[in-house]
Amino acid sequence: MGVLADLLASSASFSTDDAADSSIMRFLKSNPIDPALPTNKAATNAVVTVTANGETAGNFKLTITVGLNAPVTTGNIAYNANAAAVESAIDTACAGIPGWTNSDISAACASTADLADVILTFDGTSVAGTRCTVAAATADFSPTVTETTAGQADRPALGALKALGVVEITTKQYATPVANDFTILTTPASNPNYPPFAVVEALLKEAGFQDRANYFGWFRYAAGLGPIPS
């Protein structure tokens, strides 16, 4: 199954029952080119590294955001906490997230937080394939927090736009786009497989619906067709 078939099966912003969407549906159903979903548009689990930087006393806290849920903040975590203590603090903070099960975010550390990196992997049912972020919250000190892998769901509309040679959009899921996130790949004049503009618009709006972003407006700006979206 290619990216267009995936999109046809999972579209959220257009419908096979809507006459206005007929050109989009015809394109998705009949296009002879149906490439695989590009790797960077496939689902990934977030991985985050927390480093206490050799602290010798005090506590730190972490603020965690899972998808579109409200951020939650842990209680105090000791500077020399081991992985089990960090995971326990996260479990307590995340208990109200829909579908949460303890250890959905797993913590691993070769020693303790003051001496070694704590690796957080978002691989449980409630967080896998989801855009998740971690930040240091106000406490005795702020550890260094580094996103190793950005979590995301499958993004078939963005994948289709890239695979069809329209645009590469590198905005992280649920993040605010900037102009540098958009690279126009080809034009209708240079690409015989370039989709009709109605399809391009529909794919951009579908991608924006999935990511809560105005990709259509930003694409128009990147292509020199409109102002920077407000």
Image (tube, grey):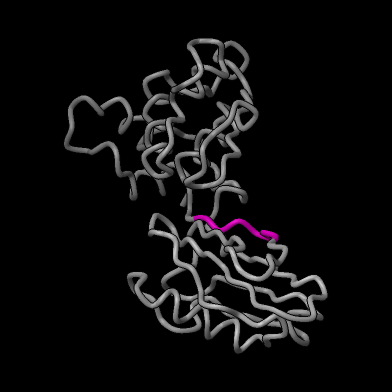
Residue 230 covered by magenta stretch: no
**Measuring 69% from the left and 68% from the top, which residue is drawn there?**
141
Q: Quadrant of residue 113?
A: bottom right
Task: Indicate the position of residue 10 as horizontal and vertical percent values.
Answer: 34, 49
Quadrant position of the C terminus in the picture = top left
Q: Is residue 110 left or right of residue 214?
A: right
Q: Is residue 5 above or below residue 56?
A: above
Which image quarter: residue 62?
A: bottom right
Which quadrant of the figure has residue 179?
Answer: top right
Q: Is residue 120 above or below residue 10?
A: below
Q: Is residue 110 left or right of residue 195?
A: right
In terms of depth relative to the viewer, which is nearer, 178 or 56? 56
Q: Is residue 194 left or right of residue 190?
A: left
On screen, residue 217 above or below 74 = above
Residue ID at (56%, 78%): 76
Answer whether residue 150 is magenta in the image: yes
Considering depth in this image, is 209 or 105 the residue closer to the camera?
105
Q: Position of residue 81 (x, y in %)?
A: 67, 86
Q: Which residues make up the magenta segment?
A: 146-152
Nearest the viewer among 32 and 95 is 95
| Residue 89 percent location from the top left of the image | 52, 81
